[in-house]
Image: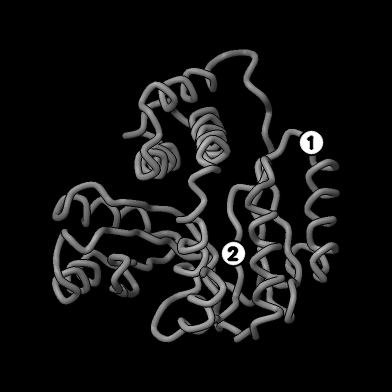
Amino acid sequence: MAGHSQFKNIMFRKGAQDAKRSRMFSKLAREITVAAKMGMPEPDKNPRLRAAIIAARVQNMPKDNIDRAIKKSQGGDAENYEEVRYEGYGPGGIAVIVEALTDNRNRTAAEVRSIFSKHGGSLGETGSVGFMFNRVGQITYPLTVGDADSMLEAAIDAGADDCGSSEDGHEVTTSVEQLGAVRDALEAKFGPAAGAKLVWKPVNTNPVGEDDARTLFKMLDTLDDNDDVQNVYANFEVSDSLMAKLSA
């Protein structure tokens, strides 16, 4: 999309949703609790927990909330959340992957299916669109840590596959296996990353027109609003001019 990744599109839309901060904190807390319950409750010994805490801090989640989420994982009354992934097609034939943490698979599946259906999409079987994405590690840094050339050089030296820089910051891409090692190497040089996690990155992006884009964004927003949904990825491409028009 004129030099910008589709991740920027989703980030751009979320930037105007300050009213959803409470729901965002709830989802971040759920991820922290699940990460701490699945591994050690200490971030330095649990990469997933460490990444979850970093994500929470980026969103200015209060330290008390983070500590409470970790403590909840150690209690006997902690909910048993299950990780599930849904795949399907949205308006304009755009491929969509939805990641959720749920304590009721039937409820979440019904709600996600309904959202797809109401916006002209269709939910498919697991794997129906996954081949259109690569599972990769993604590490992000603000522009203030260094210029594009120095970040690219450091990322490649650390074992990363690529590094792209834009006005939104530096985005380092790694293999799944190398995420932890690259993150540690970059943090030794630049300090804590703004984010470090596994994501689904489209192999190719598909352009959508204005009508499909409007409906698609409504669908993605509705998915974001669902309490069980943690992450949503889609392989759409929208021009900067249309993005500006839709965001006006």
Q: CA distance from mark 2 to mark 1?
A: 22 Å
The residue pinned by badge 2 equals: 233
Q: Position of residue 47 (x, y in %)?
A: 40, 42
In the picture shown, does residue 241 fall above or below 7? below
In the picture shown, does residue 99 fall above or below 2? above
In the picture shown, does residue 51 fall above or below 243? above
Between residue 202 and residue 160, name the one nearer to us. 202
Mark 1: few/some/many CA within 10 Å (<14, 14-19, 20+): few
Q: Is residue 35 visible?
A: no
Residue at the extreme top: 76
Label of residue 104 in the image = 1
Q: Residue at x 21, y 51 (%)?
A: 187
Q: Residue at x 85, y 63 (%)?
A: 117
Q: Residue at x 68, y 74 (%)?
A: 95
Answer with the quarter of the image where residue 186 lies: bottom left
- Position of residue 228 in the picture relative to residue 121 (left or right): left
Q: Position of residue 14 (x, y in %)?
A: 50, 56
- Position of residue 169 in the picture relative to residue 115 (left or right): left
Between residue 99 and residue 127, name the one nearer to us. 99
Q: What amino acid is at disc 2?
A: Tyr
Q: What amino acid is at disc 1?
A: Asn
- Position of residue 178 in the picture relative to residue 70 (left or right): left
Q: Residue at x 38, y 53 (%)?
A: 196
- Under tag 2, what secondary structure? strand
Between residue 184 and residue 7, name the one nearer to us. 7
- Under tag 1, what secondary structure? loop
Q: Disc 2, disc 1: CB below 8 Å?
A: no
Q: Position of residue 122 (x, y in %)?
A: 83, 68
